[in-house]
Image (spheres, rainbow, N blue to C red):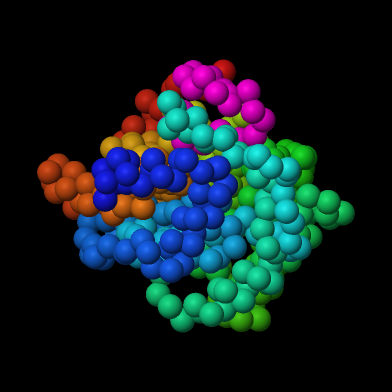
Amino acid sequence: MSGLFQSLGRKVLFSFDPEDAHGMSIKALKTGLVPGCAPQHDPSLQVTVAGLKFPNPLGMAAGYDKNAEVPDALLKLGFGFAEIGTLTPLAQSGNPKPRIFRLVEDNAVINRLGFNNEGHQAAFQRLSARKNRPGIVGVNIGANKDSADRVADYVAGIRKFNALAGYFTVNISSPNTPGLRDLQARDSLKELLSKVLEARDEAAAQSGARRAVFLKIAPDLPEASLDDIAAEIALHPLDGLIISNTTLSRTGLRSPKHTAETGGLSGVPLFNRSTIVLAKIRQRVGPTFPIVGVGGIDSAKTAIAKIRAGADLVQLYTSMIYRGPGLAAEIVKDMSALLKRDGVDNIAELRDRDVAAWAAKDLPA
């Protein structure tokens, strides 16, 4: 399907403003215009992470389905899990438009959306309607731009969605909400993790359902900050990390247009940077701590490279803009074929094989 999309569907969608095209793709999934794929049940791709059993390690990253409109349609495309959000307690419109820019020559996107979403309640109603359906759907939570207490916003997200979330992602790494990345500093991170995980444990005591909590960090952190994050993780019962969000770097871009736009860069140019950070963090947190690798994945080859660099699970988003809705099924099929070719019984066996090589690399400027 991805070949057909690239020759026909992409040309049509790319004639529209990027944000309008995104809305059209959501509607297409909602109405069933985009068909699902036959489920692939390959035991070699099944992984258990943070107590959750994933049918395959490829997920849809947060940012696409911000308002929990199409999680089940995404799962039917072949993803092993889907992450909705980022959700903030109150609805907010985000930053002024235009705020999404395609860098076609780089297979990349710059966005400065700013956590635009319909708020907790709208997503809560949609997730409640699918409560008993199969499939792992994570809930990515954030803070309102004008919040007087951003930590309290994250706590509110835990309390609101505990009964519905497959897992939580605490997103403190978007570059598009002023000051949000400051929560990655050690003292701020200590307070955030303490209160969020306390709220998680309180909700678990009341409901009997303990949800995994992942922390999503930026790819632009210096090594000293990686040390601080690893040290704080060791002091809190966090369930995993997601590495990484978009980057502020513009190193090595080829596109003649939009490279000077402010916002976070995603897509193929993010692969090396995010994978280096992933491997450096893996060395710091050890072999048992779960990590989700995100950034620049557009094929089975790049997905497996992330896993070899230290990821238990991987996610994509931007590559689907360029390759179409059939990409997930294509990657999953190709991963199965590669494992079979190489005589690998389970994809988890590949994890960490290239950690040292990736971690030894310097971060790009």
What residue appears at the point 73 percent right and 44 percent down from the top-left corner? 95
What residue appears at the point 83 percent right and 51 percent down from the top-left corner? 146
Vertical placement of 41 versus 108: above or below? below
Q: Left or right of 46: which side holds 234? A: right
Vertical placement of 242 versus 130: above or below? above
Per the image, is 239 magenta?
Answer: no
Q: Is residue 93 visible?
A: yes
Query: Where is residue 163, by image quadrant?
Result: bottom right
Rendered location of residue 218, percent (x, y): 60, 38
User: Where the C terminus falls, by quadrant?
Assistant: top right
Rendered location of residue 70, percent (x, y): 48, 65
Q: Which residues are magenta?
A: 249-270
What residue appears at the point 68 percent right and 67 percent down from the top-left corner? 120
Rendered location of residue 301, percent (x, y): 28, 37
Rendered location of residue 267, percent (x, y): 46, 35
Query: Where is residue 119, by image quadrant?
Result: bottom right
Vertical placement of 47 versus 220: above or below? below
What residue appears at the point 26 percent right and 50 percent down from the top-left corner? 1
Per the image, is 251 magenta?
Answer: yes
Query: Where is residue 10, by image quadrant?
Result: top left
Q: Main secondary structure of the magenta part?
A: loop
